[in-house]
Amino acid sequence: MSRITIKNVRLSYAHLFEPYTAGEGDPKYSAALLIDKNDAETVKRIAEAIKAAERAGVEKFGSRWKANRNPLRDGDAEDKGPAYVGKFFMNARSNTAPSVVDRRVKKITDPAEVYSGCYANVSVEFYPYSASGNNGIACGLGNVQKIRDGEPLDGRVDASDEFEVLEDETPDLGGLLD
């Protein structure tokens, strides 16, 4: 297995504190990791780790095994929305909860702190699989370090952008307190 840490990725579809399932299958902890296409060093490290997992697949499943599914996908080729433009992305999943920490490696327990749109360093593990005639390389979710905030990707508008501060109102009690 090839374990690497990918730095400065943007999280999308982040489910780091509660397992989630999109339809069928067992719930898993997961996140899509958005990687800037211009980050050649990171893309190279990911490609090397995927190649190592492919070699492990041949060793594990035999010389006829060939990966037909790659975890690194092109955000420009798939209609995933504007956050994916100019990005590669991978869906990382785990059966167990990742450890989620801040910049000082202090545990984060509030799910609102780490959200779709923030930036993080994420450890991932690439491994081969062969199931029901499908062969490929999967991306396992390791640990997550939030490094900075970003614009949330959930489409919500912040209340401070919609409302203005109101002055406190003092009710008129018609002299009842005199």
Image (cartoon, grey):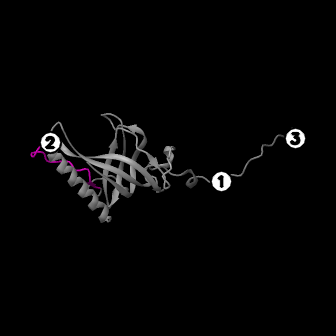
Q: Is 164 within the magenta?
A: no
Residue 18: x and y, percent? 43, 38
Question: Residue at label 3?
Answer: 175
Residue 90: x and y, percent? 30, 51
Q: Secondary structure at mark 2?
A: helix
- For image coordinates 74% across by 47% down, the residue present is 169
Q: Earlier in the sequence, mark 3 or mark 2?
A: 2
Dot 2 surroundings within 10 Å: few (below 14), some, or many (20 or more)? some
Q: Earlier in the sequence, mark 3 or mark 1?
A: 1
Q: Earlier in the sequence, mark 1 or mark 2?
A: 2
Q: Secondary structure at mark 1?
A: loop
Q: What type is the residue that disc 2 sits on? A: Phe
Which is in the foreground here, disc 1 or disc 2? 2
Dot 3 surroundings within 10 Å: few (below 14), some, or many (20 or more)? few
Question: Residue at label 1?
Answer: 165
Residue 16: x and y, percent? 42, 43
How many angstroms separate mark 3 from mark 1 (CA)? 28 Å
User: Which residues, given as a range, are shown in magenta?
Assistant: 60-74
